């Protein structure tokens, strides 16, 4: 275990005594703790690890990094990271991820309220996207009548941007499209 990981390990064990026996050390001497998610989505778990003199907390694709940026030698940043990890477990924080047509784009940990608001906004944007201009263009190009619904698959093929929200117990899970 490297020097920084040795400094952080007792604080992680103190914050999560029921998981202290799961603390591992990787080949570089960094600490890794994985807490399995009770509502497993995409193989998600909560990870607490050290790397490059910082403590990282991650869940799904959301990640937060904490370090002693000011060089004070204090462990306040580690305690802050442990509070974030507890907030994920209590669903006071959730992971939100954005995907483009090409795949994963960005992610963060945020409050359930902010995440569900972003999810709703994304769903509204998708709905608006097909209500007028694209639908009209498709109808003209394909010669479809000006009334009636377009096949859902056609919409999926044209727009693949997606917002995904994941929470520890699944209470706030959702996606901006019908497929999770």
Image (tube, rainbow, N blue to C red):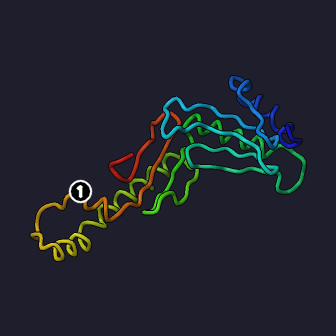
Front-most of residues 7 and 101 = 101
96 relative to 28 in the view: left or right: left
Picture residue at 46% right of the left edge, 36% below the top: 170
* In this view, 2 is above or below 144: above
126 relative to 117 in the view: left or right: left
Picture residue at 78% right of the left edge, 46% below the top: 77
Q: Quadrant of the N terminus?
A: top right
Q: Quadrant of the C terminus?
A: top left
User: Which quadrant of the structure image shows residue 85?
Assistant: top right
Q: Position of residue 83 (x, y in %)?
A: 69, 39
Q: Position of residue 137 (x, y in %)?
A: 22, 75
> For mark 1, what is the residue?
152
Picture residue at 41% right of the left edge, 61% below the top: 161
Front-most of residues 129 and 34 = 34
Q: Secondary structure at mark 1?
A: helix
Front-most of residues 131 and 179 = 179
158 relative to 108 in the view: left or right: left
Looking at the image, the residue that sits furthest to the front is 27
Q: Position of residue 2 (x, y in %)?
A: 86, 41
């Amino acid at each position: 275990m490297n020097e920084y990981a040795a400094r952080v390990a007792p604080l992680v064990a103190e914050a999560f005594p029921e998981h202290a026996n799961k603390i591992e050390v990787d080949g570089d001497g960094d600490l890794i703790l994985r807490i399995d998610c009770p509502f497993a989505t995409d193989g998600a778990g909560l990870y607490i690890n050290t790397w490059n003199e910082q403590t990282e907390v991650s869940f799904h694709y959301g990640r937060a990094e904490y370090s002693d940026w000011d060089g004070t030698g204090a462990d306040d940043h580690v305690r802050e990271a442990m509070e974030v990890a507890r907030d994920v477990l209590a669903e006071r924080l959730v992971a939100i991820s954005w995907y483009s047509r090409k795949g994963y784009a960005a992610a963060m940990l945020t409050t359930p309220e902010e995440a569900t608001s972003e999810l709703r906004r994304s769903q509204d944007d998708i709905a608006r996207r097909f209500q007028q201009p694209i639908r009209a263009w498709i109808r003209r190009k394909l010669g479809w009548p000006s009334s009636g619904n377009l096949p859902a698959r056609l919409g999926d093929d044209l727009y693949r941007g997606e917002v995904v929200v994941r929470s520890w117990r699944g209470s706030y899970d959702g996606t901006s499209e019908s497929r999770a």
